[in-house]
Image: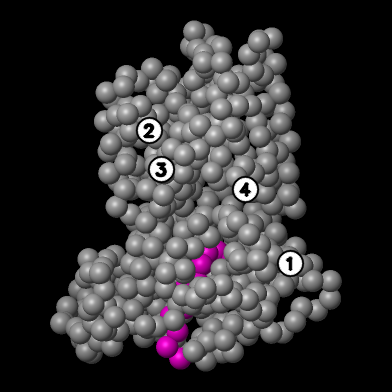
Amino acid sequence: MNRLVVVSNRVPLPSAGHKTGGLAVALDGLMEKRGGLWFGWSGSVSAGAPAALARVESAGHVDYATIDLTQEEHDRYYNNFSNGVLWPLLHTMPELMRFDRRDAQTYREVNTRIAASLQPLLRPDDLIWVHDYHLLPLPAALRARGAKNPIGFFLHVPFASPDVLGAAPEVAALVRDLLAADLIGFQTDNDLANFAATAQALTGAVRVSSTVLLLAGRRIKLGVFPVEIEPHAFAHMAAEMEHSEQCERLRRSLQGQQLILGIDRLDPTKGLMQRLAGYRRLLEKHDPLRRQVTLLQIAAVSRKDVASYRTLRAALDHEVGSLNSDLGEPDWTPLRLIAKATVRPAVAGFMRLARVGLVTPLRDGMNLVAKEYVAAQDPQDPGVLVLSRFAGAARQLEAALLVNPHDADGMADALDAALHMDLAERQARWQALWAAIENRSPVVWGRSFVASLLRATAPVAPRPMVPVGKEIVAPMLPQRLPAELETSTIDPRRLN
């Protein structure tokens, strides 16, 4: 079996204890079962020049290799370009972007250094799986150092349309670098379509089929791989935590009020200000709900060095105070804001208590919180998920109450419907939502990507390229799959 090499911006080191973050949660099970190498930034900033060689620590069947960043690299590569340019741009919020060519240059230099540090650790039969927007140039940087391994890339965030992406001068070169990968995966079919259109418009790539691009004689496979949670394990954790001391304290403090729960990072893409506007309209339009509901919003502070995040924190604090002072009563605080992280087991218990899960990002690659809320519910008395139609999860969780986060009145009406929904409808909606996630898992997600990567790089018989209209169509010929795929529990012929 080929060794799996995962490359990500941050590495969830076993010495750091509890793993957090969507990527760590999604890949942890796969890496523990399959083994391999996980490479990336340690999370530390070095005072001087960082060491040329990566540090390696092992746990079980996984080796964790990390490098440090300098302060300038952290500021320019991580804060300014990755999170100050690419993050808002890919989320279709170019107005928050602050482009500086020096940041773009450092971003490339860090990717080049990552490739140089990783290359000596590679084996000829390794499968390389690169993750997310921090590492868009890495496939080309690895190829430049002679890596001939199969390279897959997965984008966890959305991919914007070509006209939006044109706002950043570096995008065309970054997309071309990314096309050095053999397989590029996305959360939704819309993200795939946007990438294909961008690659055609900015790099001259030819779209051979709906999932194949051709550039400079190379075939690049595209696929849709929605990230999943471990639903049964999360459901078990939520049921266990329901009567924990933390949940009992929260239950007592509600004094019979229905709980609306939001769980997010404090991030401009999460629609937190729009969410509060919708909640305000709920209380203004439906006076009987006063003293009957409480919104608990947990919004862990992140990326404090990025200006747009600091601005959001100030605006959010102001609006929370305004809403509570305008609508609250001496014996009732309508909104509770917690701007710090809460441990995952406690969050699972809070989700089980909540009558409404409010997940309303302006745009999101997937949003695993929505899936976790579904898994956390008591099947006999489930809550209702109110979900932004602009979250990737909405493609799978169609039985949720889908809303436009920019429409405060629409969100208020959905919340009112959720709070008054009868038991039969709540159970029917929950059953449909549970059916969408119950047979999925991070391990199956990871295996499907790896199987598709193996298939994308399997030797194939030469095929004549036949022009049909404006597209080039390759006639389908039988092909022999690698032995690992022939015996896989996943049928690779049914994969994206």
| Callout 4: SS | helix
| Residue 344 placement: quadrant | top right
Q: How many marks?
A: 4
Which of the two labelled residues, at mark 3 and mark 1, occupies the earlier sequence position? 1
Q: Mark 2 points at which residue?
A: 378
Residue 154 in view in this figure = no
Q: Position of 280 compared to 355: left or right?
A: right
| Callout 2: SS | loop
Which of the two labelled residues, at mark 4 and mark 2, occupies the earlier sequence position? 4
Q: Name the residue under label 4.
A: 95
Q: Residue at x 46, y 75 (%)?
A: 35
Per the model, the C-alpha gap separating discs 3 and 1 is 34 Å
Q: How crowded is mark 1: few (under 14 residues within 10 Å), some or many (20 or more)?
A: few
Q: Which of 432 and 412 is in front in this view?
A: 432
Q: Position of 481 compared to 2: left or right?
A: left
Residue 427 in view in this figure = yes
- Image location (x, y in percent) of residue 477: 16, 82
Q: Residue at x 56, y 55 (%)?
A: 21
Q: How crowded is mark 2: few (under 14 residues within 10 Å), some or many (20 or more)?
A: some
User: Mark 2: which amino acid?
Assistant: Asp
Q: Give the range drawn in magenta.
A: 124-134
| Callout 1: SS | strand
- Image location (x, y in percent) of residue 78: 68, 63
